[in-house]
Image (cartoon, helix red, strand yellow):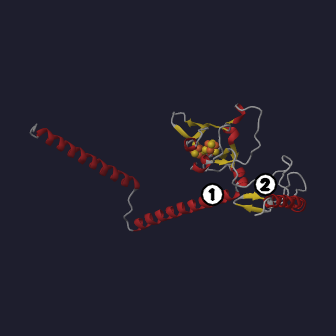
Amino acid sequence: MAFGSGVIRGMGITFRHLVESYVIGFKEQPAAAGDLVAPTAVRAGMPVRTGGMQTVQYPDEKLPIPERFRYLPFLLYEDDADNDREAFDGIRCTACGICAKVCPPQCIWIVQGKGDDGKPRPVATEFYIDASICMSCGFCAEYCPFDAIKMDHDYELSSYERHESWVYDLQELLHPVAYHAAIHPTDWQRELEEQRAKDEAKRRKAEAKAAKAAAAGADGDAEDPEAAKQRKLEARQKMLDARKAREAAKAAEQGDAPDEA
Ligand code: SF4
Ligand code: SF4
């Protein structure tokens, strides 16, 4: 390659981008602030411009955020009145603590609720995330077995101090399920399908059980559930007695054995 040809090629690329800025970029500019058109290409879920002006006039203009973008975690609550977690204000989190355990920088703090009898309840009365430490890895959302924590798209969270306002409490972290469905449509569809499959499997299992019970009833062999429970308890007691008898016999045998020392 001739000396200086790389420089000339680079200048050619720069010139091409300049021209594209006036041709492609001009066509893609939003008609109004906040109305940016879709990117010209999408690769691996990220918007990628293939040419033209690269500068976005933030904050008047904003690029579309890919669904998988993640910033800070948020907690979900069910927004319909008739839900499984109604007793806990619809809050999905059961305070199992898995997210706090897997969080690499340990920035999640949870306090589990307790009933009047002092026994733990499956709900968090306090839930804090220190956003100044969170590294947006998404592990908490990945590992949560209840789909109770998801990653937010809101990145405009700057503040004038680095302490109190960066520690988010339960009320600040809570968002309705509809918000999650709106920002993560693909994820939401997958969750719905999984839930449908689970409900269907549960329904089939219940049907199979009912059919089995009906068949046994028709044969006149149906056993009362209470009687079955009693039968199992008695069998267990017999096993325990037999084990005790074996141990007693063994102990007696060892006690009678001559001292070989
Ligand atoms: S893993 Fe999910 S359910 Fe468990 S404490 Fe964290 S957010 Fe709550
Ligand atoms: S995103 Fe990562 S660092 Fe942030 S709270 Fe979740 S697990 Fe911790």
Q: Residue at x 74, y 31 (%)?
A: 161
Location of residue 212 in the rendering, given as x and y in whole percent from the top left corner: 44, 65
43 lies left or right of 100: right
84 lies left or right of 213: right
Question: Which mark is first along the chain, 2 or 1?
Answer: 2
Figure quarter occupied by ligand 1: top right
To which residue does mark 1 refer?
191
Kind of residue at badge 2:
Pro
Helix, strand or loop at label 1? It is: helix
Q: Residue at x 58, y 62 (%)?
A: 197
Q: Is residue 240 visible?
A: yes
In the rendering, which numbered label is found on residue 103?
none
Location of residue 56 in the rendering, given as x and y in whole percent from the top left corner: 84, 51
Location of residue 54 in the rendering, given as x and y in whole percent from the top left corner: 83, 54
To which residue does mark 2 refer?
64
Q: Which quarter of the image is occupied by the C terminus?
A: top left
- What is the quadrant of residue 167 in the picture? top right
Is 9 above or below relative to 248?
Answer: below
29 lies left or right of 257: right
From this viewpoint, which residue is outermost toward the front? 3
Image marks 1 and 2: residues in contact by CB distance under 8 Å:
no
Q: Nearer the viewer, residue 49 or 97?
A: 49
